[in-house]
Amino acid sequence: MKRSSIREAIVVEGRDDVTVVEQAVDTLILATHGFGITAETWGLIEKAYNERGIIILTDPDFSGEEIRRRLTERFPRAKQAYLPRQKAIKGDDIGVENATPMDVLEAIESAHATKESAGEKIEMEELVRLGLTGIEGASEIREAVSDRLGIGRCNSKAMLRKLNGFGIGIVELEEAVEWVKQQRSQK
């Protein structure tokens, strides 16, 4: 597999994550080494953030989301890459290190820049209308749509926050829902 070159630095949790990301992209990769992020590591991440931008790619589990939350609080304009949970599982272990380089590359390429919505704010009523909440099976559809949009697994309230935070408009959301429904009907 030919590695893609990207401008932003990738921030991951550990050295095994670095190994798989190195197989996917040619860029600076920084590891937090879990929750205990040292002052030196914070400084490196801040330097990368200010000079070239960063993409946060953490494990699709509770710890990964907590690390992502801490990083995003400090670096609010960081791009967010999400790896679908099913692509990060090996046995009982969940983590970026279990994904294929192609899956990692796909997650990085679909990372959305965190930006203000251009006046088009999605409301909860739209999620209800599209079957993403309030009906039986909504969580499975919401998970597939979240994967399609590259925003990570979330409940309906978090989905609304992410859609509006990433500036994803109603047209893009409707297209993702339609794509997921077509995929499900072909099974």
Image (cartoon, rainbow, N blue to C red):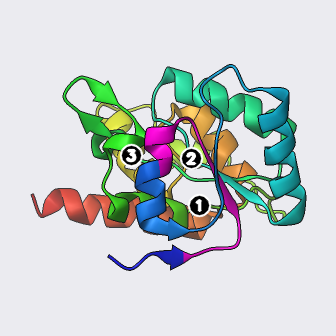
* Residue range highlighted in magenta: 5-18
Q: Point out the image quarter for the N terminus.
A: bottom left
Residue at x-position 80% and y-position 59%: 115
Q: Which residue in the structure is indicated by mark 1?
A: 111
Viewed as shown, does residue 176 lie left or right of 120? left
Check if residue 46 falls in the magenta segment: no
- Secondary structure, mark 2, is loop
User: Within the image, what quadrant is residue 76 found in?
Assistant: top right
Q: Earlier in the sequence, mark 1 or mark 2?
A: 2
Cα–Cα gap, marks 3 and 2: 11 Å
Q: Is residue 78 above or below residue 71?
A: below
Pointer 1 with pointer 3, Cβ within 8 A: no
Residue at x-position 51% and y-position 31%: 155
Q: Nearer the viewer, mark 3 or mark 2?
A: 2
Q: Which residue in the structure is indicated by mark 2?
A: 57
- Secondary structure, mark 3, is loop
Q: Residues within 10 Å of mark 3 (few under 14, many from 20)?
A: many
Q: Earlier in the sequence, mark 3 or mark 2?
A: 2
How far across and down, in percent of the image, does residue 132 sit? 44, 43
Q: Nearer the viewer, residue 89 or 127?
A: 89
Amino acid type, mark 3: Pro
Q: Point out the image quarter for the C terminus.
A: bottom left
Q: Which residue in the structure is indicated by mark 3?
A: 84
Pointer 1 with pointer 2, Cβ within 8 A: yes
How far across and down, in percent of the image, does residue 138 sit? 36, 37
Q: Residues within 10 Å of mark 2 (few under 14, many from 20)?
A: many
